[in-house]
Image (cartoon, grey):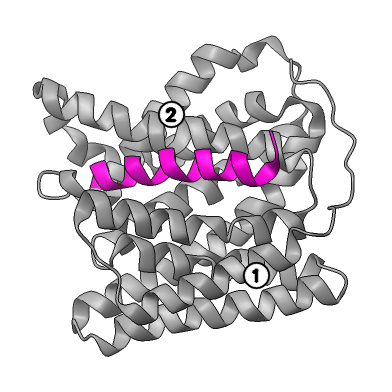
Amino acid sequence: MPAPALFVASGLTQYVGAAIAVGLFSVLAAPTVAWLRLVVAALVLVAWRRPWRLRWTRRDLAVVAAFGSVLAAMNVAFYVAIDHLPLGTAVAIEFLGPIGVAAVAGRGWRERVGIVLAAAGVALLAGVTVSGGGGADVVVGLVAILLSAVCWAGYILLGRRVAIGGSGVTSLSLAMAAGAVVFAPFLAADAGPVLSDGGLALAVLGVGVLSSAVPYAIDQVVLRRVGPAAFAVLLALLPATAALVGALVLRQWPHPLDVVGLLAVSGAIALTSGRPAPAVAAAPVP
C-alpha cells in the first residue's frame, strides 16, 4: 500500500482510540490511561512477536529502551494535552515535532516550501485555540503538547533506527514493554479501578490496541521504506484525521480558521508527496 494510505489507516485507528480514552478521563487520570494503553499494547505485541527468540546486544537493548522511554513520555504528555485541548488542535500543534525533523533532514525546495506551509497551518490552528480562552487549562494543555512534540521528534529518529535494524515490530514490542516498566512506579498505583470493572478494562483494551499496537506497528513498516523527512511530512495527514474523529466522535467542531489551517497542512502533503523519498533497504521482519 502507498505510504499515505497506510497513514490514513494508522491515523483513524489511533484517534478513534484517543476519543475512547477521552471518555475515560472522568474515571482515571489522563497519565494513567496513557500508561495502561502502553501496557496493553506491549502485552499484545510481545505475545505476537516473542522478542525473546532473538539475540540482543547491549547496544540494541539500550536503543530499544531509549525508544520505549521516549514513546511512553510522548503518550503520557499527549493524553494530558487532550484532556485540556480539542483532539484535532492538540495533534496539529504536536506536529511541530515532525516539522523540526523534516527541517533538519529534508532536502530540496519542495520539502522546504512544504515545511513552511505546514508550519503556517499549525500556527493558525494553535492561534485559534489560544484566542478562544480557557485560562489555566489551555496553558497546561499547550505545555503538555509541546513536550509531546519534542518526544515525537525523538520517536521518529529513534524509531527509524530501530526499524532499519531488521526487527522493527519485534523491537517495538520490547520498547513498549520497557516504556511501561519505566513509568510504572509513577502511574501504576492509580490503575486499580481497571481490575474491578470489566467494562472499564474492556475500554482500556480497546484504547491500547487501537491507539498503540496497530498504528505503531504500521509506523515501523513505513519507516523502513522512507527517510525521516518524508515520514515527518506524511504525518501531516494526522491533524486532519484527528479533527475528523474529534468532530464525529467528541463533537469538537472546528472553527472556520481551523479548516484553513488544516487545508494548509494538506497542501504541504500534496506538495511534498509528489517527490519520491530516498530508498531504504528493507530487511525482513522475523
Residue at the image position 24 percent from the left and 41 percent from the top: 20
Indicate left or right for 241 with 272 as reference. Answer: left
Identify the residue under disc 1.
268
Is any part of residue 65 visible from this angle? no
Q: For the C terminus, which image quadrant?
A: top right
Residue at the image position 67 percent from the left and 63 percent from the top: 270
Nearer to me, 205 or 29: 205
Amino acid type, label 2: Ala
Indicate left or right for 41 with 164 as reference. Answer: left
Q: Which mark is residue 41?
A: 2
Residue at the image position 80 percent from the left and 36 percent from the top: 164
Say few, some or many: other residues with alpha carbon within 10 Å of mark 2 (under 14 / 14 to 19 / 20 or more): many
x and y percent of residue 223 in the render? 72, 42
Nearer to me, 32 or 271: 271
Amino acid type, label 1: Ala
Q: Which residues are magenta?
A: 1-21
SS label for mark 2: helix
SS label for mark 1: helix
Residue 266 sits inside the magenta stretch: no
- Looking at this view, name the residue that lies furthest to the top: 53
x and y percent of residue 55 in the render? 76, 17
x and y percent of residue 180 in the render? 43, 36
